[in-house]
Image (spheres, rainbow, N blue to C red):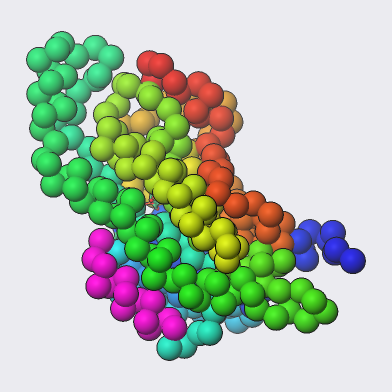
Amino acid sequence: MTDLNSQSLFSVKGFVAVVTGAGSGIGFMISKGLVANGAKVYLADRNAVDAQVEELKELGKQTGGSAFGLHCDVSKKSDIQELARYVAEREDHVDILVSNAGIRRDPPKGCNVLQASLSELQESLWSSPDTDWIDSFQTNTAAHYFLSVAFMPLLEAASRLDLGEGRVGKDAGRGVVIVMSSCASMHNATNVDLTSYATTKAATDHLVRLLAAKFNRFYIRVNGINPGFVPTNMNKVGEKDNIFKDLFDKVPAKRAGNEGDIVGSVLFLASRAGAYVHGINLCVDGGRVLVANGQE
Ligand SMILES: NC(=O)c1ccc[n+]([C@@H]2O[C@H](COP(=O)([O-])OP(=O)(O)OC[C@H]3O[C@@H](n4cnc5c(N)ncnc54)[C@H](O)[C@@H]3O)[C@@H](O)[C@H]2O)c1
């Protein structure tokens, strides 16, 4: 009989997870949320994560979760291959891959897109180095593809894990890729210029569906999360020169997103609760895309 208790429905206890970009912001929130709920988490980042891992090891003493740190620059296919090889030597399956690492490259010459003259607007748009576009696609889009492919065998192993009584891993939500997109993929706000970033995220949303379809036969689920404003190093909400500072109050929720919003979405998509959810993008933005289309 299905257990409808929320602790059972949303359980990730004992699950093995890999989180990229785990050293900061949303990636660390997710790692913390998973350890808080008894998962074993590999924190991968291009920067050192020793302090973060120590903090989560302490947390794990109370929750049964655990944490390990790994170096990985997800813009390099060779690093991704090495990450998958390292984890495969230690685990016979991976229940959750959170492909979260991301970058945002704003044009060096900003302008108010709503008021700039044609020449100011052109100068601002043209100031983006071509490498900003290439680097953004490498990290924000291609890395999700290579990570998902590299972890296919371990994710598939989680999906068919024998849980006893005729149940297998996929029945409990095991074997899922969660890709970090952004609500920037879903609106065409024009007062700030996020063109390269938003374009990579829109490509990522389609990648979610493409990979979900490719992985169909093995029921390795692939889903995306599209957050709105969440205070992090990338988006220092409340900072005086944050390019979004005039927009926070205009979100219908009248607040920025926080770790509860993000972790709650991950627990849903990664557990029994989300076991029937495949190939979707979940927008977690306090309603921002409802009002952001058009001018701001
Ligand atoms: N903060 C927001 O408001 C917001 C909104 C929507 C989407 N997002 C997305 O959430 C994800 C996390 O962003 P954040 O806000 O936490 O930013 P952040 O800058 O605080 O954290 C990003 C992390 O990714 C790591 N990283 C970057 N490039 C990497 C690479 N090539 N290899 C390995 N690690 C790398 C960084 O070292 C850092 O630890 C990104 O994909 C971002 O686009 C953020």
Residue reaching furthest bottom? 89
x%, y% of residue 244? Answer: 36, 31
Q: Work out whether 222 lies above or below 41.
A: above
Check the picture and name the quadrant holding the C terminus.
top left
Residue range of the region highlighted in magenta in the rendering: 75-88
Identified at 11% across, 40% down, the residue is: 129
Q: Does the magenta segment cover residue 66?
A: no
In this orientation, which residue lies closer to the viewer: 134 or 262?
Answer: 134
What is the chief secondary structure element of the magenta stretch? helix
In this orientation, which residue lies closer to the viewer: 227 or 53?
Answer: 227
Instruction: Describe residue 8's horizontal placement relative to residue 124 as left or right.
Output: right
x%, y% of residue 231? Answer: 43, 45
Q: Work out whether 22 lies above or below 198.
A: below
x%, y% of residue 22? Answer: 41, 64
Residue reaching furthest right? 1
In this orientation, which residue lies closer to the viewer: 40 or 234?
Answer: 40
**Quarter residue 218 falls in:** bottom right
Q: Does the magenta segment cover residue 82?
A: yes
Instruction: Describe residue 32's horizontal placement relative to residue 125 as left or right.
Output: right
Identified at 64% across, 51% down, the residue is: 277
Instruction: Describe residue 192's horizontal placement relative to residue 256 as left or right.
Output: left
**Quarter residue 107 falls in:** top left
Check the picture and name the quadrant holding the N terminus.
bottom right
**Quarter residue 240 falls in:** top left
Q: Can residue 164 be seen in the rendering of this structure?
A: yes
Identified at 55% across, 72% down, the residue is: 156
